Amino acid sequence: MKNKTFLIILALLFTLTALGLIVAQHIWPVLQKYATLSWIGLAFFTALTLATFYLGKMTAQSPNLMAFTNMSIGLIFGKMILSMLIVFAYAQETKPQDKIFLVPFFSIYLIFTICETWILLKLSSPKPSKP
């Protein structure tokens, strides 16, 4: 996958997710009081997807055949830990009254995880050689 193609996909994903957050906050006003966590999550997962692409691109071309797999597993584990830390820090700081604050954050998590998985699959698949 070319850099330009990836950046267009990421910009589109960011824009559609941001629009989805705005619409969700208008449809369900209870989400408005948790908008900060949603926007933090969107910025975090966008940055992480950007890092995933460039790390994946580097390790997919590495002579070490395990580099790409190790990077993928490390990013999955790291993303889960950092996500839990963000949610924990937010919950400690704001003391939310209900658990609905988790819905937008983990919806963004799911959307970006699907995108990252697709990107990693594209990067890991060998390109067909022309005869």
Image (cartoon, grey):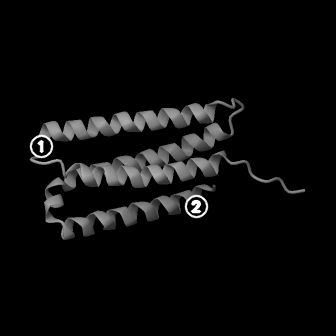
The x, y position of residue 10, in whole percent, is 47, 58
Q: Quadrant of the C terminus?
A: bottom right
The x, y position of residue 75, in whole percent, is 47, 36
Question: Nearest the camera: 88 or 5?
Answer: 88
Q: Residue at x 14, y 60 (%)?
A: 30
> Counting other residues with Cα less than 10 Å from the Cα at mark 2, is it few (<14), some (14-19), or many (20 or more)?
few
Compared across the picture, whether 102 is left or right of 5 comes to left
The x, y position of residue 45, in whole percent, is 39, 48
Compared across the picture, whether 74 is left or right of 26 comes to right
Compared across the picture, whether 59 is left or right of 53 comes to right
Q: Vertically, is 83 above or below 98?
A: above
> Counting other residues with Cα less than 10 Å from the Cα at mark 1, is it few (<14), some (14-19), or many (20 or more)?
few
Q: Give the residue at mark 1.
A: 94
User: Is label 2 in a helix, a strand or a loop?
Assistant: helix
Q: Quadrant of residue 66 in the image?
A: top right
Q: Is residue 12 visible?
A: yes
Q: Vertically, is 1 above or below 76?
A: below
Q: Is residue 39 visible?
A: no
Q: Give the residue at mark 2.
A: 5
The x, y position of residue 98, in whole percent, is 13, 48
Q: Residue at x 63, y 55 (%)?
A: 1
Q: Residue at x 65, y 45 (%)?
A: 124
Amino acid at pointer 2: Thr
Q: Residue at x 63, y 48 (%)?
A: 123
Q: Vertically, is 19 above or below 46?
A: below
**CA–CA distance between discs 2 and 1?**
39 Å
| Closer mark to the observer between disc 2 and disc 1 | 1
User: Is label 1 in a helix, a strand or a loop?
Assistant: helix
